[in-house]
Amino acid sequence: MRLAHGDTRAHAPASGVDSAADEAVPPVGHAPAVAARDPDGIAPVPHPAHGLHLLLTLSGCDRAILDDEARLRELTGRAARATGAQVLQVMGQRFVPAGVTVLALLAESHASLHTYPEAGTAFWDCFTCGDSCRPERGIAVLVETLRPARYERMVVERA
């Protein structure tokens, strides 16, 4: 499901898996990268300057998982790979007294997970450039592990 800029949808997963995450999202309507030219018209631009940006708020999550840096690093890598992205590096930091931030550097851009165990909340941000990745595909991976009572997502087309 692709949402227009600013639209949000709330979800309460019935079985821990978001069926909408598997829906096909048509490519953003831009010319292929091979046809793109730089502003001077001299050389082909290697990648079109557009992509999809997924913002996800997961509420009512398992609090113990939200404070487990090693598990969240692994989860971030799996969720990012599920989008079709190439994960270059994953790094994380646990904070005192609680909370973890994990960043995944992608060949296509980035993904990040920020947790607030005391509130049972996590924020996921995934931006992928071009047409080859679908950020929504990572939702099912996150929901399966974090087991939120509810989540809200927003997908923004960036051009």
Image: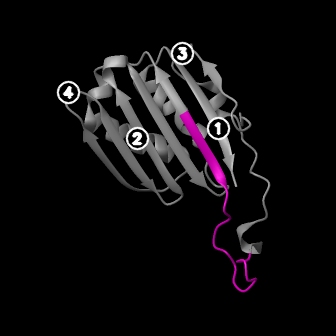
Amino acid identity at mark 2: Thr
Q: Disc 4 vs disc 2: which is toward the camera? A: 4
Disc nearer the start of the sequence (2/1) = 2
Spatial distance from mark 4 to mark 3, Cα to Cα?
32 Å
Q: Identify residue for label 3.
A: 15
User: In this rendering, does residue 36 appear at all?
Assistant: yes
Q: Are marks 4 and 1 in contact (CB under 8 Å)?
A: no
The 10 Å Cα crowd at callout 3, few under 14, some 14 to 19, many 20 or more, is few
Amino acid identity at mark 4: Pro
Magenta residues span 37-55
Spatial distance from mark 2 to mark 1, Cα to Cα?
18 Å
Q: Identify residue for label 2.
A: 76
Amino acid identity at mark 3: Ser
**Badge 2 element:** helix
Spatial distance from mark 4 to mark 1, Cα to Cα?
32 Å
Q: Identify residue for label 1.
A: 155
In the image, 119 versus 64, the foreground residue is 119
